[in-house]
Image (tube, grey):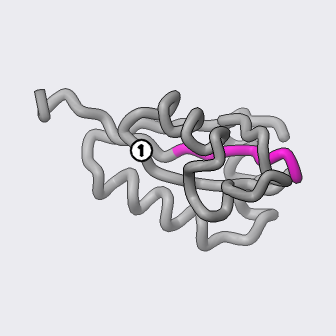
């Protein structure tokens, strides 16, 4: 049912120690897609893989999840790390 659909914002830790934020409705499937080199352009580089999902947050609406992704992607690395630490994620 559409009413029960969840939308997720997620953060990946790349093998080169960079961070990638994204949006999905199926976090496990999306991680597998990224690790297969078929995800976003950023994660297609072999030097960025393997990827590890270090955070996922669920939202009731697609709009909320996309806003979270946008806000995360437009921060400095230091601010991203500070946000992750607030969420009890250690890098």
Q: In which quarter of the image is residue 51?
A: top right
Q: Where is residue 76 in the image (x, y as percent from the top left)?
A: 74, 71
Left or right: 29 as drawn, with respect to 66: right
Above or below for 18 versus 51: below
Query: Callout 1 environment at 10 Å: few (<14), some (14 to 19), or many (20+)?
Result: some
> Looking at the image, which is closer to me, 73 or 45?
45
Q: Quadrant of the N terminus?
A: top left
Mark 1 — residue?
24
In depth, the one of 54 and 88 nearer the eye is 54
Q: Which of 16 and 32 is in front in this view?
A: 32
Q: Quadrant of residue 2?
A: top left
Asked if residue 14 is among those painted magenta in the image, a careful observer would answer yes
Q: Is residue 55 magenta?
A: no
Q: Which residue is drawn at 34% across and 54% down?
A: 64
Local secondary structure at mark 1: strand
Looking at the picture, does residue 5 appear above or below residue 77?
Answer: above
Depicted 89 relative to depicted 37: above or below: above
Asked whether, in this view, residue 9 is left or right of residue 44, the answer is: left
Residue at 13% from the left image edge and 32% from the top image edge: 3
Q: Position of residue 78 (x, y in %)?
A: 81, 63
Specify whether 17 is left or right of 28: right
Q: Nearer the viewer, residue 91 or 88?
A: 91
Q: Position of residue 81 (x, y in %)?
A: 77, 53
Quadrant assignment, res 49: top right
Identified at 67% across, 56% down, the residue is 44
Magenta segment, which residues?
10-16
Which quadrant does the C terminus fall into?
Answer: top right
**Residue 66 horizontal side relative to residue 83, left or right:** left
Q: Position of residue 83 (x, y in %)?
A: 68, 51
């Amino acid at each position: 049912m559409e009413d029960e659909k969840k939308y997720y914002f997620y953060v990946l830790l790349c093998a080169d120690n960079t961070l990638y934020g994204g949006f999905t409705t199926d976090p496990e499937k999306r991680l597998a897609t990224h690790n297969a080199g078929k995800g976003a352009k950023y994660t297609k580089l072999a030097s960025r893989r393997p990827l590890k999902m270090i955070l996922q947050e669920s939202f009731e609406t697609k709009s909320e999840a996309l806003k979270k992704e946008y806000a995360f992607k437009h921060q400095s690395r230091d601010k991203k790390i500070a946000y992750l630490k607030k969420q009890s994620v250690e890098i």
